[in-house]
Image: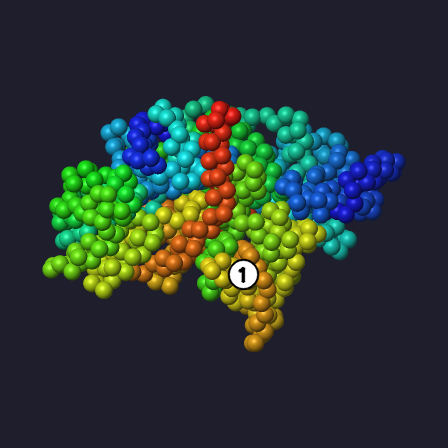
Amino acid sequence: MNRILAKEALSAEVFRIRVEAPLIAEERQPGQFIILQLDTEFGERIPLTIADADPAEGSITLIFQAVGKSTRQLAKMAVGDSIANLVGPLGRPTHLDAFGAVVCVGGGIGVAPLYPIAQGMKKAGNRLVVVIGARTKELVILEEEMRAIADEVIVCTDDGSYGRKDLVTAPLKELCARDPKPDLAVAIGPPVMMKFCAEATRPFGVPTVVSLNTIMIDGTGMCGGCRVSVGGQTKFVCVDGPEFDGHQVDFDQMIQRLGSYRAQEKLAAEGCNLHDEAVRKGLRE
Amino acid sequence: MSARAPEELRAAARREWERIQALPPPLKPRDRLAIPPQEMPAQDPLARARNMNEVATGYSEEQARVEAARCLQCKNAPCVEGCPVRIRIPQFIAALAEGDPATAIGIIKETSLLPAVCGRVCPQETQCQAPCTVGKSLKSVDQAVAIGRLERYAADWERANGAAALPPVAPPTGKKVAVVGSGPAGITVAADVRRAGHEVVLFEAFHKAGGVLVYGIPEFRLPKAIVRAELDTLQKMGVEIRTNFVVGRTRKITSLIEKDGFDAVFVGSGAGLPKFMNIEGENLVGVYSANEYLTRSNLMKAYDRERAVTPIHAAQRVAVLGGGNVAMDAARTALRLGAKEVHLIYRRTEVEMPARVEEVAHAKEEGVQFHMLQNAKRILGEGGKVTGIECLRYELGEPDASGRRRPVEITGSEFQMGMDAVIVAIGNESNPLIEQTTPGLEVDKWGHIVTDENGQTSLPRVFAGGDIVLGAATVILAMGEGRRAAAAINAMLAG
């Protein structure tokens, strides 16, 4: 169960794995996510959005950035290893429809969950423009895949090492200023990026969907740890989302809640660094 | 629940047992009523408030026999009427008095599937022990025969002695039943349906089975090894347990029936979404639902800071809002996680509190501070984090629809207390997941699945029970519903 079938490093800290998960592969729809755990007794449960699925092979594709204790551990796993626990698909699927012209904006690792949505939007008959943003050239992911489905692809990097030297909000604003303006924007990425994408589209009245990746435990509505304020109402990302109207989300609060355990996470990550260091020096296995 | 040391209680019970033996048999009711009730030995309150081990350590053999000797063996057995699953209480107590725990546990298991659990977490004082003749004669329910403790003794004896016989399973029928949720209702249905020879798959959304017994009720009140033993029994009987499976998402109920060949489905998916108070500051960092707080500590083992990856706030001053058993569990967990002060805030008085008397007493002994007739008005924060709570004082007014006197706020009585965590423990709303993904499944206005008295839902072959039907209920009620639904499923599959 949950065997890793393929693994590829997309950059120094971004990895793509294909995992055996036949039921999830069959049921999943764009926009949905899974929760995985690497140790049944003491592991943490982490939500990851599904980047792709192959029902024939019975596999799903996950793309993740090795930043925390568990994602680093996951990055060290090899083809043939099994993930202890994997559950899904969770969350409500994306609302796919023929909207007209759709702009899909992905920042960093957010391009991964954006991919199946972009695919779905294209398939639903929309004209599709994709904006990919990354800090630097080597962190740009899925450009080929996006070019294969989109009518237009714009790549930006913060440092100008590839594509335009811009934040994704710049091309997004330009697209909104075109006539006709896009009928829908979908933005997925770091919370700050989604916040500013929503601010960029707001003056143009372009409806903007964002996909939130908050702290979660069960992912089925039971704990409420993922709650966010949307239009002044408390919503649960796991069962009411993960997609919401970006113009209604209280991003500042969400960013604060995401930082709930920053101190502990930093300690855990430092523990990993020390461990890695010790391994390199041959002090530990 | 005793300030007296376990050794002292055991020695006293031994002397009492010798005294009883010296009385001319048979014992008269007067003799039985004169036997002192046996207190439950417990860890020292201050020591236990800092560890996760079970609080109540259980009767010794002498204590069990002395307590059992208090039972008057009433012909009309009012206690049985008070038990939701009608355990033959006088009979099992008589066996214990005779020093025969094997017979006692056999009698209990005729009707109850989870005696080690129910003996610990049932609200006996409002069920079997409420109408007990001994308690009535001595004019206090606290003086009733301690039926729950005796049930626990018999169940623990069986587990400790490896005496549990596997329930017999009928020959295979070729029929297949899906049980959704592995809490008390699901475990019960799985066992009863499997006994009839049907194939059973028990689906659990989490990575570990046991439902609320595992994620909700803390280790110090219900050791997880006990739940594990019950699940092991199910597996030995041939029940397949599938964790990481969210029915409604991983597979829909209709697919289980139409594609996967299940002949019946039982939904025991439990209490769903935690309720919040809808007050200012509720989304600040440091505000938890009791579900989240308890799940982090119990299921994810956040209390084990050395080994667990899941973090939990190391809060010093914690406010718990609510007055039920879950509120008590959260407050006592906060102490064990290192809080210096835990304040339990409830808007009525202790008399109206839904929590069990024993849990309230335990919480107080351990140092939880109770604030009655107060309620949070808003949660205060700085930089996105909890810094305190503003409360209002209340007084009791006229009785409301529930018959309890309605708390009425005292205008202008606001006051503030500094806190660095707030736990909201005011109950759950039902989880809409199954309903949303199962066309034709009828629910009431609160989202609870509508069933007949046998647990049959509006859909053929689909049954339901436990909290998803009852709202907030107890382990024993869930088990009772499970038993009725299992009987109906077995009858349907036999027909």
Residue A47 placement, left or right of B142:
left
Front position in the image: A80 or B200: A80
Q: Which residue is mark 1?
A: B387
Identify the residue at horizontal 47%, vertical 62% (top origin).
B281
- The x and y percentages for residue A52 are 26, 37
Identify the residue at horizontal 80%, vertical 38% (top origin).
B7
- The x and y percentages for residue A128 are 15, 48
- The x and y percentages for residue A118 are 21, 45
Front position in the image: B255 or A47: A47
Identify the residue at horizontal 56%, vertical 76% (top origin).
B411
- The x and y percentages for residue A222 are 45, 48
Q: Residue furthest bottom?
A: B411
Q: Which quadrant of the rendered structure holds the C terminus of chain B?
A: top left
Identify the residue at horizontal 66%, vertical 58% (top origin).
B369
Chain ID, mark 1: B
Considering only vertical position in the picture, is A94 above or below B201?
Answer: below
Considering only vertical position in the picture, is A111 above or below B226?
Answer: below
Front position in the image: A248 or B87: A248
Q: Tell me the quarter of the picture where residue A63 sits.
A: top left
Crowding at dot 1, Cα within 10 Å, few <14 / some 14-19 / many 20+, comes out as: many
Is residue B185 visible from the viewing direction of this image? no
Is residue A172 visible from the viewing direction of this image? yes
Which amino acid lies under the numbered mark 1 shown in the image of this protein? Thr
